[in-house]
Image (spheres, coloured by chain):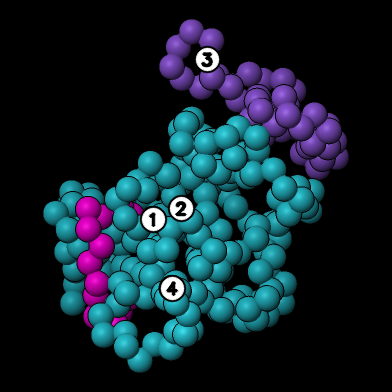
Chain colours: A cyan, B purple
Amino acid sequence: MKEFKIDDEYTIVHNCDTGHWDYHKNQQSLSKEAEVLYKFYSLNINNLDALLNNYFYLSNPVDFNDPFDCNINLIENNDNVEIEKLQIPQRNKYGNIGVFSFSETIDNHLMWAHYTNNYQGFALKFEGNNIQVLPRSGQLKKHTLTRVIYPTTLKPIKREFPFAQHYVFTNKLNHWSYEKEWRIIAELSEEKNRILYY
Amino acid sequence: MYVGHKLIDNYESAYRLILGIHEERFSNVPVYVVYPHKTELKLNFEKVLN
C-alpha cells in the first residue's frame, strides 16, 4: 500500500524517503512542522504548577472533551479489544498513551471560551519547531509532535494498516477543525508517569 | 504569554501569581492581556510587559 484515501480532501501517503506516512490535503502534502504553537490553560492549581515548573501533562484521551477523539472504533473489528464494563463504553481509554495538545491559533474566540474557561485563564506561545521535551530516563517508549486532521467523516480502517495507530490518534471530527490542533503523542512506560518536562 | 481579561477582573491574586512566575521563569517573554476589541468584533492583544 502506498496511499489511503480518507475522504475527498485527505489522503495518507507513504513517504518513500522517510518511511513515514504523511497527510495530504487536496493533493498537497501538509507540513510536518509548525512555526508557532499555542497552549491554552484554564485557571487551576495544576496548570499554575505546570507553568511554574515547566512541564506538559500528558493526558489520557479518555479525559478529553471529545469521546470520539482517539477512539478505538476507528479500527475495524476491534471486538477483541478489552474495554471496561461500564454503562458508557470508554472507547478512548489508554493506560499507556499520553497526549498534550497545542493549537496553531491564538485569536480564535472559541479557544479562549472553551479552554480558558471564558477568558479566565492564560495561554503560552511555543516555537513549534523548537519544543524540547526532557523525558526522564525510561519515561517514554516513544513520542512525536504531529498535526491533527479533520476529515468530513471519520472512516474506520483495518488494524493491519501500517499507519493505524497514528491514524487513530490524529483524526478528529470536522466539528473541531477550528482548533487547528497539533499534539504530542507519547507511549508511556508507566501509566501514572504523565508529567513531561520541557 | 497571554492572559485572559477575566482572569484579571475576577482573580487578581492569580494574576499577581502568574506575573510572579513570569518574572522568575520567563522574564524576557512579553505578556499580553486578551480582551474583546472596543469597537470591532475581534480580539485585542494588549502588551503589558516587555
Tell me if I can see residue A125 in this picture.
Answer: no
Residue projecting furthest to the left: A8
Q: Amino acid at mark 2?
A: Trp
Q: Quadrant of the C terminus of chain A?
A: bottom right
Neighbor class of circle 2 (other Cα within 10 Å; few <14, some 14-19, many 20+) is many
Mark-to-mark CA distance, 3 and 1: 30 Å
How many neighbours does mark 4 have within 10 angstroms: few (below 14), some (14-19), or many (20 or more)? Answer: few
Q: Position of residue A151 (x, y in %)?
A: 25, 55
Tell whether position A158 is magenta: yes
Q: Going from the N terminus, do you reach mark 1 or mark 2 first?
A: 1
Q: In this figure, which residue is indicated by the disc labeled 3?
A: B37
Q: Secondary structure at mark 1?
A: loop
The image quadrant of residue A132 is bottom right
**Residue assigned mark 1:** A148
Q: Residue A51 location, x and y as percent? A: 74, 48
* Residue furthest out toward the top: B39
According to the image, label 2 marks what residue?
A: A182
Using the rendered image, report if marks 1 and 2 lie on a common chain. Answer: yes
Q: In this view of the protein, which residue sits in the foreground, A85 or A148?
A: A85
Residue at (60, 40) in percent of width and height: A116
- Left-right relation of A53 to A32: right
* Residue wearing tag 4: A88
* Same-chain status of marks 2 and 3: no
Q: Are marks 4 and 1 in contact (CB under 8 Å)?
A: no
Q: CA distance from mark 1 to mark 2?
A: 6 Å
Q: Amino acid at mark 3?
A: His
Dot 1 amino acid type: Val
Write down the region rendered in magenta. Answer: A149-164
Whether residue A72 is situated above or below residue A124 in the rendered picture: below
Q: Viewer-proximal residue, A35 or A95? A: A95
Measuring 47% from the left and 85% from the top, which residue is drawn there?
A: A85
Query: Which residue is at the front of the view, A109 or A12?
Result: A109
